[in-house]
Image (tube, helix red, strand yellow):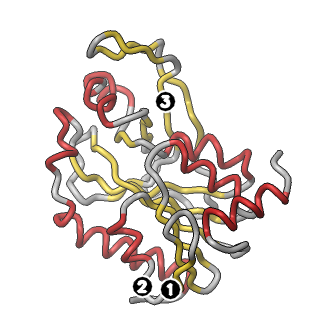
């Protein structure tokens, strides 16, 4: 286990202060961070951070490095990750999934433009105390957007959506001692690099509604 001195140094670096509140909201999407941070106090850390009451809002990097913040947060923190995902079941663009678990490739090798895998492993499970709003949903987490495209035919048979973070976060949360949920907004349907032509402004109504709901739940504050 990482000691308290390491955690404090990491919090000060990432967040700009030794934050010790109750709720944390993480997102790699600037649009989401901006909406969550209305009326919050900006901090001067490595990653864009704002504090409102007992909650901290952090714009984190994409991918596996987001785990570092889980290990820095005080044990017992309730963490909400809000991100985007490619839908694999024809979900409506803008719909929100709250997966109960995530899978990841058990072994990966790239041969030319083919991704080979020895199968899929359970990366981890949701640990947040409030019940999932989409029970039974499973995410698949891959290493990069190219992999999500090249694996599309596999993915549609094993998961409901694909992203870059949920599996890493679900795996890390029990070791970090935090409670975690991942709220994933469907931005596209994954096939053929659809993510690159998705229009984030089309997601604004869904993002606004989700951010309003999470802010009210965690802080009692609405915009």
Q: Earlier in the sequence, mark 1 or mark 3?
A: 1
Q: What crowding class fits label 2: few (fewer than 14 Cα within 10 Å), some (14-19), or many (20 or more)?
A: some
Q: Give the secondary structure at mark 1.
A: loop
Mark sitting on residue 193: none
Q: Residue at x 34, y 10 (%)?
A: 111
Residue ID for mark 1: 40
Which quadrant would the C terminus be assigned to in this image? bottom left
Nearer mark to the viewer, of 1 and 3: 1
Residue ID for mark 3: 104
Instruction: Give the spatial CA distance, label 1 vs label 3.
Output: 35 Å
Instruction: Give the spatial CA distance, label 2 vs label 1.
Output: 5 Å
Which residue occupies the foreground of this view, 221 or 146? 146
Q: Residue at x 28, y 52 (%)?
A: 186
Relative to residue 195, is residue 161 drawn left or right?
right
Q: Quadrant of residue 74?
A: bottom right
Q: Residue at x 34, y 58 (%)?
A: 96
Which quadrant would the N terminus be assigned to in this image? top right
Position of residue 24 relative to residue 148, above or below, is: below
Position of residue 170 relative to residue 22, above or below, is: above
Which residue occupies the foreground of this view, 87 or 52? 52
The answer to whether marks 2 and 1 mark residues whose Cβ atoms lie closer than 8 Å is yes
Q: Picture coordinates of residue 25 (x, y %)? A: 53, 67
The answer to whether marks 2 and 3 mark residues whose Cβ atoms lie closer than 8 Å is no
Mark sitting on residue 38: 2
Q: Residue at x 32, y 22 (%)?
A: 154
Q: Picture coordinates of residue 146 (x, y %)? A: 29, 31
């Amino acid at each position: 286990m990482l000691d308290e001195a390491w955690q404090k140094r990491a919090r000060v670096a990432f967040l700009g202060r030794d934050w010790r509140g109750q709720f944390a909201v993480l997102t790699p999407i600037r649009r989401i961070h901006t909406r969550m941070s209305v009326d919050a106090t900006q901090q001067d850390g490595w990653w864009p951070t704002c504090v409102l009451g007992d909650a901290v809002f952090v714009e984190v990097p994409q991918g596996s490095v987001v785990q570092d913040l889980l290990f820095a947060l005080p044990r017992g923190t309730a963490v909400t990750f809000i991100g985007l995902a490619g839908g694999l079941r024809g979900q409506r663009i803008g719909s929100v999934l709250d997966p109960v678990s995530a899978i990841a490739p058990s072994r990966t090798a790239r041969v030319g433009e083919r991704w080979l895998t020895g199968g899929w492993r359970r990366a981890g499970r949701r640990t947040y105390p409030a019940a999932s709003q989409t029970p039974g949903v499973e995410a698949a987490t891959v290493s990069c957007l190219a992999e999500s495209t090249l694996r599309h035919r596999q993915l549609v048979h094993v998961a409901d959506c694909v992203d870059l973070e949920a599996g890493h976060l679900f795996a890390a949360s029990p070791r970090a001692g935090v409670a975690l949920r991942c709220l994933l907004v469907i931005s596209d349907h994954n096939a053929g690099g659809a993510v690159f032509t998705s229009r984030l402004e089309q997601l604004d109504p869904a993002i606004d509604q989700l951010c309003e709901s999470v802010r009210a739940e965690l802080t009692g504050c609405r915009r």
